[in-house]
Structures are given as structure tokens and as C-alpha cells.
Image: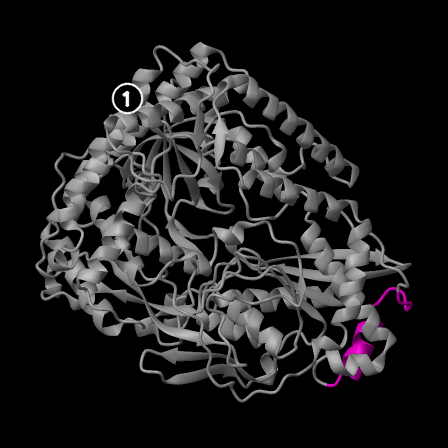
């Protein structure tokens, strides 16, 4: 299944004790550290580079942000609140007594930034590290005696609105219940007491090690994130490594060895090899290998990286194209004590094709008619702005890739095209504009308003760029955001195609990426201030409405899974309000309303009989039922009874998945019972298999979207008058073109059951993004 929600079992169990967001960051700001880090020395202290970066950011945010706000007492209090939310969102580390001691900083963060004195946020961060270590040490001590599961104790799994524990005694009781739940999960999975004790002791010990590796760069990154996000949800501070990773995600390429790494205990493990990358082509590096050391050049010393943070290891392995890096590894099939091997690799430019646009063809047969529906899945609006500005004719671009795929789909004889934008969080505003031009011949597709109120329409007037003029649909969900909403809204406002799915995220703002080093008083000193991704504009639909907060409402609605209560622009306290402006000068090319009632009726009739659709609805209902639970029992007999009941429900789901053409392996991940383990505690082989099975699982939403488009094509063929209304650019020519590649001329009389289950505005100097959220 393709819904964006947690596995069902995760809602029955409490979240296990894991590192908070700040401790799990894959990238940290690199403020001039001379060597990678292992254990930080407390107390952490701010440095001049960080103080300057904060001051420069404050000048920019208070003067040039779209909704510029003074860095005063009120903003200080917002930063203070969000800083603690980032550090201790579940309120399991600090007590009310701690918060009373911290209250002196509540309205002072603004003054500290202006005065280049960050001692307050660093003091809080130091206390956080000490509390986190103390709590995990306490949890480890509880493992010695075990627990009594015959009590009526309960544990609250949702503490975001809870009060801080009053004192250490109340905090100890909270951690007793958290640790008790971790133990109970493993016990219900059939683990012995000895195995449980070993597993949890190792888990908590690893957590302590990770927390001890947090340093001043992490403290500064977390504080600046709190400041940036306090201005609006999509303004962010990015340290140099975060900025590098953002750039990689936009251009879908990097210079390195072409290996995806993950942390596992004290080791760095090869999780995936990028096809055609140096590591894969060498034939000497394999998935599961452990990286023990990294050496630079053909003869440089090997640096032992056991116990290192993942981002530090990645930083050593990445490097300039055509340079050599040497890895000391233990092959996957030999275990941690196997024979070490030294492998030399030459870094190259590596394309990250996993996030590129992809296509496939779905054959829909109904009423004796078969039609080919093309599908293009676009995970994000990517673009290599550097290569484009340098004149590289082959620069990576979402629009260029989609245009190529559309040409291939034409050759394969598809009659309609679905653009799948589910969970596409946005990206380049430029690419959203260009992509719209593949489907609409001319006219504006978005309006952009600056901080001074000036409105600029963006669009294309190049009919030759239009690549597909036939029937189309856009599939969206709650994860469809920003640039994806620009594209979807334009298609809807022009009447160019059907928008199908669930209401989108609701992000209607544009960010620009600013290199803070440009504002250094002494550029020759090579400062490393990082970058600021700042909201500078708001975009509006061409009909004058905004996607801000409201998102895009589909023409044909699919059932929601309930995540809209916790996920989306409307869940942010400081989101910009919804507004509207006058419509742009545009003319719709068609009117989808002409056949929406018929399509909706056919959709409902078909899905009422579709086993795949009904299974999806039942799984959503089960998910919502468990999601509404915020308290769980710590009584073994009660939890065991709940587990048996859930096991029966999941067994029914698995059987139904298999009956509609899947298999036990292809059943949804939600069908797997809780094993009590964290992801990093499972074998890599198990993780990769689950990931592959999820890709193969039936996708009833996509299948039904294709079937709706199938119905639309049938109606168009049967009624030239209707075709003239719903097909752009005249209708008759498109009707003939569609009919010419249709395998049967008849229109289905009764629907059958569903089958199966930026950063840029065009100016390279000031790159902008419609943004991912």
C-alpha cells in the first residue's frame, strides 16, 4: 500500500526509547572543526563563527523575510518554546524544576543573538545532554530486576500536550513505565528475559554513546533551527553539511563512491550500492559490508572510524571527482571478526536515480475493452542549477526527464497519462513552471507575491514545448506539497486534467537559499557560516486563491487516513494565513465538470465491488482506530489478548491481500506483528526484504486512478460534444488520436472491479525554492 502512515502495530505499542530529533541528525553544521568527532567534551561552548552566523541570520530574517518580525522579547519566547520542543518533545528529560531554572532565558534569546553571546542556548543544550545520559543510565539500572506485569499500570504514548514531570520522582516513574513497555514488547514477541535484558541494555548503551557525540555544532544547529522555524515553518538554517545534502537532493548527484551507508551499533554498514557507481563497478564492495577505516589517496593513512557518527564517516568518503579513497572493510559474509580488506576506489560523479522520474504502463480491461494508461511517478521537482547555469546541455531536470518519458509512453501507445505526485514534497519553482508547460501550451501557471505586495505571474508562452495534449490525471495525497501543489493547481484551474486523491499539504510559500559567507566581514578568512533557507514570497493560483493552509482539493476524492490532524501546513502554529488576490489573465482550456458526476458515479460503483478497495478501506479504519489510542496497558495478559486480536485482524488482511493477486510477502508492511526491535536492531537482510516487498505490494489508489482515466477516455470516445468540453485544444483531433490506439471501440456499460491492489526562480545568484516541507 502507498498510504503515508505508520504501521498499524506502531500505534498499539508506545514509541520505544529512542534518541530525540537532535541526536538522530544525519548531518551537523561544520563550524570549522579540524577533525571528525567521537566524544564531545562538556561543557559545550559557542564560538565566534557561530555567533557571527546567528547575527547575520538575524539581520536577514528581520529585514528581508516575507513576514519579517523583530527579534524581540516576543520572538525570543517563540524560539524558547520551539527549542525545547526540538530537544524534549515528549517531555521525558526535563522536569518542572528544570524548566523553572531555565525560565531566566525565556525572553533573552534575542538579546543573546544581537550581543553575539549564545551562552544561554548552550547551557540548556549541555543540561539536555546530561539529562539524556542520566535517563538512559537509569533505564539500564531497571533492567537488573525486571518488571511485574501483573499490575494495572498504563503508559501514555502521546505526551506532546503533557505537563513536564514535577520532580525527579515523577520522572523516574515515567521512565520506569517507558522501560517496562520496551521490555513488554519484546516479551510479547517471544523473547526470553535474558535476551530482553541484553537487547535493551545494548540499545540504551548505544543511545548514551550517540548522545555523548553531540557537540557544539549540534547545539548551534538545533538553536538556529528553532529561531528559523519560529519565523515560519519553512524557513531553516542549514549548516554546511546540511546545505551540501540539500544541494545533492536537488541535483540528484554527488561526487563519491556511490554507496548508501547506515549506522549499525558502532559500525558503518553498506546499505545499498548505486548502479554504475565506483563501488558497484569495482565488484569488491557489497551490501552488508562493514566500513572500519577510511584513507585518503593511494597511500594516505587509514583512519579508524569504528564508533564514529555516520555523518563524519560520510564526510571522509565523499570527495572531489577523480580522487582516490581507500576503505578498510570486513565483508558481509564474515561478520565483525572477519578478515579486513583494503579497497581502493576513484570517486566519480554519481547519479541518484532512485529519486528520478520513472514510468510504467498499466493495462486496464473493462467491459471487453483494454486501454493502456501511462504512469509517471515524480518524487520531487529536482534540478541541477549549477550545471544549468554553466551551460551543461545535459543538466539534471525533472521536466527534461518527464518530457523524455512522455515521448516513450507515446511510442508505447498509451491513451492517457497519470502524473503520480504522492509524497512529492516540492522542490524547484522553476521546474514546476516548466513541467506545467509540457501539458499547457501557453499562459501563466502561478502568481508570486513578494514582501512588498508586488505580484508577478509566471508561465510559458511556447506551444512547441507542450509534449502531451491527451487525457491526463494527477494523483495527489497529503504529502503532495509546494511545487507539486503549484503544478496540480494549474492543471485544475485550466481544466487540463483530473486531480484525484486526498487534499494536499497546503504549503504556499517560496524560499530562497542564501549563502551566509557572502556577508562575512573578512571573506578571505574563509568562514563557514552555513546557509539560510528563507521565505521571501508567497505563491497563488492563477484563479487568485492560495494553496496556503487549504492545499489543493481533488476533483475526485479518495478516503483519508487521518494523518491530516498531525501532518500538513494547518498543523503548524505559526503558518501564514490563507489569503487571495485577483485572478491572473488566463483562459481555461477545458471544463472537467462536464463529466465529473459520471466519473464519480462509476468510481463509487466499481469500488463498492472491488476487494482491493474494500481491503484498503478496512486497513484505514483499523489504522484510525489504533491511532486514536493514546494510552496502553502494561499488564501482560491484557496486552497479550490485544496482540492476539490484532494478529487475527492482520491474518485476515494477509489472506485478503493474497486473494486479490498478492502474496504473503507482498502483503502490506502493516501486517507484520511487532517484534519489539528498533529498525537498527533488525538484520539488514530483513530490512531490505521488507523494503522490496513494499515496492511490490498492490497499489489500489494508483490502479483506481488509472481506471478513472480509462472511464474518461471511454466517455470522450462515445460523445464528441463531451470531448470538445473536456479535452483541451478543440477535442476532435484528440478524440481521433485516442481512438486510433484504443484496442476496442466500445464503451463499458458497467464498471468492473479495480484491478489488483527549489530552489530557483531563474536567477542563479539567488536560488529559490517552492520547497520541500
Q: Residues within 10 Å of mark 1 (few under 14, many from 20)?
A: some
Q: Residue at x 46, y 30 (%)?
A: 288
Query: Quadrant of the rendered structure where residue 442 is?
Result: bottom right
Q: Residue at x 57, y 61 (%)?
A: 503
Q: Position of residue 646 (x, y in %)?
A: 63, 29
Q: Indicate whether residue 741 is drawn in magenta.
A: yes
Q: Measured along the vertical axis of the image, is residue 334 above or below residue 742?
A: above
Looking at the image, residue 415 sits to the left or right of residue 435; the answer is: right
Instruction: Give the structural element (helix, strand or loop) at label 1.
Output: helix
How was this image coloured?
Answer: one colour
Residue beneath disc 1 = 138
Query: Quadrant of the rendered structure where residue 107 is?
Result: bottom left
Q: Position of residue 417 (x, y in %)?
A: 69, 66
* Residue 302 seen in this snapshot: no
Q: Give the magenta-colored segment's residue range.
A: 730-747
Q: Measured along the vertical axis of the image, is residue 84 above or below residue 416?
A: above
Looking at the image, residue 706 sits to the left or right of residue 322; the answer is: right
Q: Measured along the vertical axis of the image, is residue 384 above or below residue 586?
A: above
Q: Residue at x 28, y 36 (%)?
A: 295
Q: Position of residue 316 (x, y in %)?
A: 29, 42
Q: Residue at x 36, y 21 (%)?
A: 202
Amino acid at each position: 500500500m502507498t498510504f503515508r502512515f505508520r504501521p498499524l502495530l506502531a500505534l498499539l505499542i508506545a514509541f520505544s526509547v529512542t534518541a530525540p530529533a537532535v541526536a538522530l541528525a544525519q548531518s551537523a553544521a561544520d563550524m570549522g572543526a579540524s577533525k571528525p568527532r567521537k566524544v564531545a567534551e562538556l561543557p559545550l561552548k559557542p564560538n565566534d563563527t557561530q555567533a557571527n552566523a546567528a547575527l547575520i541570520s538575524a539581520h536577514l530574517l528581520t529585514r528581508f523575510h516575507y513576514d519579517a518580525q523583530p527579534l524581540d522579547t516576543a520572538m525570543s519566547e517563540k524560539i524558547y518554546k520551539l527549542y525545547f520542543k526540538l530537544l524534549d518533545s515528549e517531555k521525558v528529560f526535563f522536569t518542572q524544576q528544570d524548566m523553572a531554572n531555565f525560565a531566566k532565558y525565556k525572553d533573552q534569546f534575542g538579546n543573546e543573538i544581537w550581543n553575539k553571546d549564545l551562552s544561554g542556548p548552550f547551557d540548556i543544550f549541555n543540561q539536555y545532554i546530561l539529562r539524556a545520559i542520566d535517563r538512559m543510565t537509569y533505564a539500564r539500572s531497571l533492567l537488573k530486576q525486571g518488571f511485574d506485569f501483573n499490575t494495572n499500570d498504563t503508559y501514555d504514548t502521546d505526551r506532546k500536550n503533557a505537563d513536564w514531570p514535577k520532580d525527579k520522582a515523577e520522572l523516574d516513574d515515567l521512565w520506569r513505565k517507558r522501560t517496562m513497555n520496551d521490555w513488554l514488547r519484546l516479551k510479547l514477541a517471544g523473547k526470553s528475559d535474558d535476551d530482553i535484558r541484553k537487547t535493551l541494555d545494548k540499545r540504551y548503551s548505544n543511545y548514551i554513546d550517540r548522545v555523548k557525540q553531540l557537540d557544539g555544532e549540534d547545539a548551534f544547529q538545533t538553536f538556529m533551527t528553532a529561531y528559523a522555524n519560529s519565523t515560519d515553518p519553512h524557513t531553516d538554517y542549514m549548516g554546511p553539511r546540511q546545505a551540501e545534502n540539500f544541494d545533492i537532493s536537488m541535483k540528484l548527484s554527488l561526487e563519491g563512491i556511490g554507496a548508501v551507508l547506515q549506522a549499525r551499533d558502532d559500525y558503518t554498514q553498506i546499505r545499498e550500492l548505486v548502479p554504475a557507481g565506483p563501488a558497484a563497478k569495482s565488484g569488491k564492495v557489497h551490501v552488508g559490508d562493514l566500513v572500519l577505516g577510511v584513507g585518503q589517496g593511494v597511500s594516505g593513512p587509514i583512519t579508524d572510524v569504528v564508533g564514529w557518527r555516520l555523518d563524519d564517516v560520510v564526510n571522509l568518503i565523499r570527495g572531489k571527482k577523480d580522487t582516490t579513497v581507500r576503505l578498510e572493510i570486513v565483508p558481509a559474509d564474515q561478520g565483525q571478526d572477519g578478515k579486513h580488506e583494503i579497497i581502493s576506489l576513484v570517486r566519480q560523479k554519481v547519479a541518484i536515480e532512485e529519486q528520478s522520474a520513472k514510468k510504467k504502463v498499466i493495462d486496464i480491461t473493462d467491459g471487453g475493452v483494454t486501454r493502456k494508461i501511462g504512469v509517471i511517478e515524480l518524487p520531487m521537482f529536482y534540478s541541477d542549477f549549477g550545471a544549468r547555469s554553466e551551460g551543461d546541455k545535459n543538466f539534471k531536470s525533472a521536466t527534461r526527464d518527464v518530457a523524455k518519458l512522455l515521448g516513450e509512453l507515446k511510442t508505447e501507445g498509451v491513451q492517457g497519462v497519470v502524473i503520480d505526485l504522492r509524497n512529492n514534497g516540492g522542490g524547484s519553482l522553476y521546474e514546476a513552471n516548466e513541467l506545467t508547460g509540457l501539458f499547457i501550451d501557453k499562459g501563466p501557471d502561478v502568481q508570486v507575491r513578494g514582501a512588498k505586495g508586488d505580484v508577478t505571474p509566471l508561465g510559458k508562452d511556447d506551444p512547441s514545448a507542450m509534449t502531451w495534449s491527451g487525457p491526463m490525471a494527477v494523483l495527489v495525497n497529503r504529502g503532495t506539497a509546494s511545487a507539486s501543489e503549484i503544478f496540480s493547481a494549474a492543471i485544475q484551474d485550466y481544466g487540463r486534467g483530473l486531480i484525484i486523491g486526498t487534499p494536499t499539504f497546503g504549503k504556499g510559500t517560496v524560499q530562497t537559499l542564501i549563502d551566509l559567507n557572502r556577508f562575512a566581514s573578512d571573506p578571505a578568512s574563509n568562514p563557514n557560516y552555513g546557509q539560510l533557507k528563507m521565505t521571501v514570497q508567497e505563491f497563488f493560483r492563477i484563479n487568485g486563491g492560495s494553496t496556503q493552509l487549504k492545499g489543493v482539493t481533488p476533483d475526485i476524492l479518495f478516503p483519508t487516513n487521518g494523518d491530516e490532524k498531525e501532518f500538513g501546513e494547518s498543523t503548524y502554529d505559526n503558518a501564514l494565513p490563507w489569503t487571495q488576490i485577483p485572478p491572473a489573465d488566463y483562459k481555461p482550456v477545458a471544463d472537467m465538470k462536464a463529466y465529473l458526476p459520471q466519473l464519480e458515479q462509476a468510481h463509487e460503483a466499481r469500488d463498492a465491488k472491488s476487494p482491493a478497495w474494500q481491503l484498503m478501506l478496512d486497513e484505514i479504519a483499523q489504522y484510525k482506530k489504533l491511532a486514536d489510542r493514546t494510552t496502553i496497558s502494561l499488564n501482560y495478559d491484557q496486552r497479550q489478548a490485544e496482540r492476539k486480536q490484532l494478529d487475527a485482524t492482520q491474518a485476515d488482511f494477509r489472506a485478503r491481500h493474497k486473494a486479490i493477486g498478492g502474496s504473503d510477502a507482498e502483503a502490506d508492511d502493516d501486517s507484520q506483528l511487532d517484534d519489539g526491535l528498533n529498525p537498527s536492531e533488525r538484520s539488514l537482510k530483513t530490512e531490505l526484504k521488507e523494503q522490496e516487498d513494499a515496492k511490490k505490494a498492490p497499489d489500489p489508489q494508483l490502479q483506481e486512478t488509472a481506471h478513472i482515466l480509462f472511464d474518461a477516455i471511454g466517455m470522450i470516445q462515445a460523445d464528441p460534444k463531451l470531448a470538445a468540453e473536456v479535452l483541451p485544444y478543440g477535442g476532435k483531433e484528440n478524440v481521433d488520436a485516442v481512438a486510433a490506439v484504443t484496442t476496442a471501440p466500445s464503451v463499458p456499460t458497467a464498471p468492473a472491479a479495480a484491478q489488483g491492489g527549489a530552489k530557483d526562480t531563474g536567477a542563479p545568484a539567488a536560488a529559490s525554492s517552492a520547497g520541500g516541507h
